[in-house]
Image: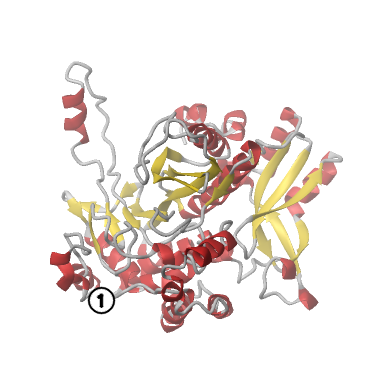
Amino acid sequence: MNLKHIELSQNELVKHLQKPASEFTCDDIIRFIEDRGIEMVNFRYVAEDGKLKTLNFVINNKEYLETILTQGERVDGSSLFSFIEAGSSDLYVMPKYRTAFVDPFAEIPSLNIICSFYNSNGKPLESSPEYMLRKAVSVFKEETGYTFKAMGELEYYVISEDEQFYEGIDQKGYHSSTPYAKWEMLRVEAMKLIAQAGGLVKYGHSEVGSFVKDGIYYEQQEIEFLPTYVEDAAEQLIVAKWIIRMLGYKYGVTISFAPKITVGKAGSGLHVHMMLEKDGKNQMVSEGSLSDAAKKMIAGILDIADALTAFGNTIPTSYLRLVPHQEAPTNVCWGDRNRSVLIRVPLGGIGAAEMIKDANPKGGALNIERDSKQTVEFRVPDGSADIYLLITGLVVGALHGLKMQNALEKAAALYVDCNIFKDENKHILENLEQLPISCCESADRLNAKREVFEKYGVFTHGLIDNKIKILKSYNDERLSELLYGNDEQIAALVDKYLHVM
């Protein structure tokens, strides 16, 4: 990070310490705390339910501050993870200095730091989703030479009382502006606070979903991020969800990342964009088209896409979203700029130099060479995703593809260049593998392909078993069929899972 980037950073620690977050040390954290009059430190960490947990520390003196920053603190692991026995449940949480940010909601000046879990021997907790992502990153780099980067698209609904003026059009809220997008100001405030917490925000906008039901107003919003190292990509999504929920609490409205709010209205996804890098250069494009490495990556992820639903679509209402004609995928395929497919290749900025000249004939374009922005977008997951495990699974899928002997042939066979849901393309749709239609089926697919996930020692056998057990416990094999036409039961189910991961 050069000086220009540091000065433009929204993160208070980066600006004050004049260094990128990746270089923060214990001494840096202490200096910031002393200089800024911070009175509390909050350890934050993600347990099995996917939500941020908190351990608060009042700073009594410098020695105590040094102790918690270097030795962490013990917590009850059996209350955080169902697979940890109460008889040997103690874990350590250790702060990761690069994640530190000022708590924007605390009345007492406070610093938040994301933590990792360690066992009683001081070793990383093998079954911790956060550690599995770290392992995946290391194995991927070692096996391929590539750096895997990612970013998420975070969709959510703001649910409030209907104000009955400046009414939008049902399901036509895409990119609406205030006053038709009534909760734009909440989104803008969230973007600012996420950036201050270290998140790399790309942009925000209102989404398609906008409707009134029984006097309640539902408005869908989206915040999208920039590609970054996958651990950072995961944690900025986790922190962002916390910040958005806190703002909903502040404004007295309900925030929901649930995959489905009601039948017939747009569901909320959590799309993940991915890219490969080597020596700081994007490797997704070669000679103006998608590279072989990118196609192999796509093939590998498609090969285990059905099993990835176990980490990205984890509740029964997830499968009310994955239905035809809703811009949510149902079949295993990919394509360019195609929103009916599972993996989409979006526009990557080709031709930008000509566009800027055409739009600004007298303004002059910046004569700066830019690297390709090309990514590929995995469109299956939703807000119920275990973010660490989902992204870990995508890294494993990409590695699987880069190692597959027939990856390019598989990619070619699964490419589609049409809307597969149109009647004239029915013959194509019939030949594509379907995604699971329930949590129970997702568990079966994970079990069938567990060898891919366990091959490099990234996913533990026990975690896969536990995930299958949880998914099976929903007993939702025929849920969509049983709920069809029963609005009351659907509403009850949506309400049950309104506040997901």
Residue positioned 34% across, 42% down in the render: 172
Q: Would you place residue 403 above or below residue 273 in this image? A: below
Tell how many labels.
1
Quarter of the C terminus within the rendering: bottom right
Residue closer to the observer: 209 or 291: 209
Residue positioned 20% across, 25% down in the render: 359
Q: Which residue is mark 1?
A: 405
Say whether residue 463 is visible.
no
Amino acid carrying mark 1 in the image? Gln
Question: Quarter of the image holding residue 333?
Answer: bottom left
Residue closer to the observer: 263 or 3: 263
Q: Would you place residue 50 above or below residue 64 in this image? A: below
Q: How is the image coloured?
A: secondary structure
- In this view, the residue farthest toward the top is 362
Q: Name the element at disc 1.
A: loop
**Residue count near mark 1 (Cα–Cα under 10 Å), binned few <14, some 14–19, many ≥20:** few
Residue positioned 39% across, 53% down in the render: 266
Q: Would you place residue 28 above or below residue 296 in this image? A: above
- In this view, the residue farthest toward the left is 424
* 181 relative to 372 in the view: left or right: right
Say whether residue 356 is visible.
yes
Q: What percent of the width, then of the height, locates residue 302?
A: 32, 69
Q: What percent of the width, then of the height, locates residue 212?
A: 46, 45
Q: What percent of the width, then of the height, locates residue 87?
A: 79, 78
Residue closer to the observer: 126 or 214: 214
- In this view, the residue farthest toward the right is 60
Q: What percent of the width, then of the height, locates residue 353?
A: 20, 32
